[in-house]
Amino acid sequence: MMRNLPHPIQYQGSKRNLAPIILKYFPQKVRRVVEPFAGTAAISIAAAAKQIARQFWLNDINKSLIKLIEIIIESPDEISGLYSKIWREQHNDSVEHYYQIREMFNRTHDPEFFLYLMARCSKGSVRYNAEGFFNQSPDKRRKGTRPEKMEKNIFGVSFLLKGKCTFSDTDYKKVLQCVAPNDLVYMDPPYQGVCGERDSRYYAGIAFDDFVVALDELNKKGISFIVSYDGRRGTKSFGNPLPDFLNLTKIEIEAGRSSQATLLGRDEITVESLYLSPALLENSPKKQNGYFETGYKTEQFLLS
């Protein structure tokens, strides 16, 4: 089952829960899945489980995050043991222990510290200050994923992806310059409309105009790609939609009520958008079977 896939990192904004719907728009087989904004690699994990590709390129400008993902995939014994050691050291004063680990991570950027911080931080939400230091506080109600469960998730991800990945921590535009027509590019950039070009929720943001130019270049090269970008909650929209001249097909996914709306007692549905490239649809069985009647239309799906 897709919902039972291993995920060592609880990461706010991860597409883990949306992966089953997003993968509906992937080709049945591709040479390589490329994620220029890999985050916790939720889409590549899901694509590997469905055997859509045997090669993956995971890139993220956050060097500590991509290094952690690499160690999880390639050296599961090492990171699992380190996490267990750090987790078991916290019990005398777990809150103070968290702050000590946070200080050590900001000084050293060691991935094992980062894994513990993400497992223990408030709401699974990574935050950085203006100097680029991790500054999220701990969740005082819980002590993070237990080592036994973390080990199971780490080895599960390693089983799916070990020996199949290229890892990098460069600017997304450099990645896009290297992709080929037989690749499938999935992009989940910092959430436009929430973060702008810089926000504490993200290590770095991107400029809207630069991103549009990069997508236009992919179209000219005939590259297949999918973008998770803007969205809305209730009547409030987040960010500008991608421009019409890119000829992208927009898919809207109803992702249910946000945690914030639930806390406030509001009946507001969160809707996230996918944009499908012309090259992707050109070879899509759904288009060839008349699923996309106009070529460029909005479809809505309820995430159950």
Image (spheres, rainbow, N blue to C red):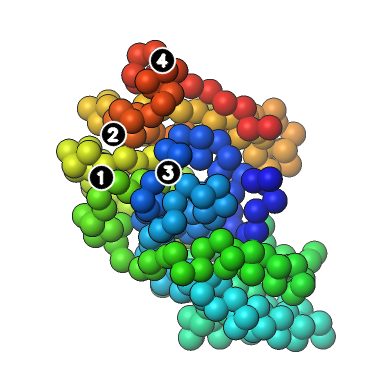
Q: Secondary structure at mark 4?
A: loop
- Residue at position x 73%, y 41% in the image: 263
Asked if labels 4 and 1 touch by Cβ distance under 8 angstroms, the answer is no
Residue 72 locus on image (x, y percent): 56, 72
Question: Tags 1 and 2 in contact by the CB under 8 Å rule?
Answer: yes
Label 4 belongs to which residue? Answer: 290
Q: Is residue 225 left or right of residue 4?
A: left
Q: Are marks 4 and 3 in contact (CB under 8 Å)?
A: no
6 shown above or below 276: below
Which is more N-terminal, label 1 or label 3?
A: 3
Residue 123's spot in the image, x, y percent? 66, 57
The residue shown at (64%, 69%) is 155
Q: Amino acid at mark 4?
A: Gly
Specify few, some or many for label 4: CA neighbours under 10 Å numbering under 14, 14-19, or 20 or more. Answer: few
What's the mark number on residue 279?
2
What secondary structure is found at the residue carrying circle 1? loop
The residue carrying mark 1 is: 181
- The three-letter amino acid code for the residue at tag 1 is Pro
Q: How much space separates mark 4 and mark 3, taking CA atoms?
A: 21 Å
Question: x and y percent of residue 126 in the render?
Answer: 55, 62
* Residue nearest the observer in this picture, 300 or 209: 300
Residue annotated with mark 3: 29
- Quick one: quadrant of the C terminus? top right
**Of labels 4 and 3, the one closer to you:** 3
Label 3: element kind: loop
